[in-house]
Image (tube, helix red, strand yellow):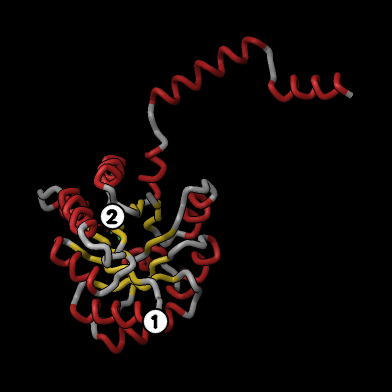
């Protein structure tokens, strides 16, 4: 399973990428707005930090302008993935970009029927939004299970299921259980994944016992090296 981070905050991206666990980045117009920065500069800087797919979303709603914006965005770096909304114009743009071998992430997916359309348009990624479905009193993960099952029926569907709008670690676990290919994580959720009080307590106890021995692994290794010389 791949981990993308869902943010346009460069400091967060640099910090999380340092973990070695980040495979890509997703942004959207709201996240770019939150960064308070010029979109083309932000995307270029993110692409320098993370070599994997970096989603940059078009903001036009008609095919011609989406294509023009996609040209600008994809010229920034090879790893830019063009994000298009799940609309007729968005899917037409998706198909045209895929014919040019440009990666495309189809976003704002809320139904299995929409996910089938995206796969037929050759999307590299489909982004179903689980949190926003949960917010409506539905079970967003049901949609992930349906899409994974549908895509598995067809060898010619190469679209990866990228679970978006993740609100917490449970969404990550349920996405993994459903067989999703990618999760895009808000920075706080990626950090929460590490956390368990028993890990903290267990480590504190191990370190206390170790300290009481007065031993040091590196000192012992050094002693052995010196003795062998
Ligand atoms: C995905 O690519 C979107 O940027 C994101 O996951 C939306 O999440 P939200 O529902 O928390 O805004």
Find numbered disc 1 in the image and state the secondary structure of the residue it sits on: loop
Quadrant housing residue 83: bottom left
Q: Is residue 217 left or right of residue 8?
A: right
Query: Residue 4: which numbered mark, if any?
Result: none
Ligand 1 lies under 8 Å from the Cβ of mark 1: no
Instruction: Name the residue: 50% across, 22% down.
Output: 203
Quadrant housing residue 93: bottom left
Residue 205 or 36: which is nearer the viewer?
205
Q: Between tags 2 and 1, which lies in front?
A: 1
Residue 57 or 128: which is nearer the viewer?
128
Identify whether 153 is placed above or below 221.
below
Determine if residue 129 is in view. no
Question: Mark 2 or mark 1: which comes first in sequence?
Answer: 1
Instruction: Name the residue: 18% across, 58% down.
Output: 150
How many residues crowd around disc 1 within 10 Å: few (fewer than 14), some, or many (20 or more)?
few
Is the residue under label 1 in contact with that under label 2 (CB below 8 Å)? Answer: no
Q: Which residue is mark 1?
A: 100
Find numbered disc 2 in the image and state the secondary structure of the residue it sits on: strand
Q: Which residue is mark 2?
A: 163
Instruction: Name the residue: 51% across, 60% down.
Output: 50
């Amino acid at each position: 399973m791949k981990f993308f981070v869902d943010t346009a905050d460069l400091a967060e991206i640099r910090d999380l990428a340092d973990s070695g666990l980040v495979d890509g980045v997703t942004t959207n117009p709201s996240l770019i707005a939150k960064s308070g920065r010029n979109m083309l500069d932000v995307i270029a800087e993110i692409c320098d930090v993370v070599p994997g797919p970096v989603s940059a979303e078009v903001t036009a709603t008609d095919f011609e302008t989406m294509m023009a914006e996609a040209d600008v965005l994809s010229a920034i770096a090879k790893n830019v993935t063009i994000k298009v909304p799940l609309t007729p114009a968005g899917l037409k743009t998706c198909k045209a970009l895929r014919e040019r071998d440009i990666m495309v992430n189809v976003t704002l997916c809320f139904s299995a029927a929409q996910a089938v359309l995206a796969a037929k348009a050759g999307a590299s990624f489909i982004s179903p939004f689980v949190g926003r479905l949960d917010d409506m009193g539905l079970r967003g993960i049901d949609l992930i299970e349906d899409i994974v099952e549908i895509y598995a029926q067809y060898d010619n569907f190469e679209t990866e299921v990228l679970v978006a709008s993740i609100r917490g670690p449970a969404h990550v676990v349920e996405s993994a259980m459903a067989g999703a290919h990618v999760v895009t994580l808000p920075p706080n959720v990626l950090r929460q994944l590490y956390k368990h009080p028993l890990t903290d307590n267990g480590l504190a106890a191990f370190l206390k016992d170790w300290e009481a021995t007065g031993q040091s692994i590196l000192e012992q290794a050094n002693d052995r090296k010196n003795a062998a010389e």
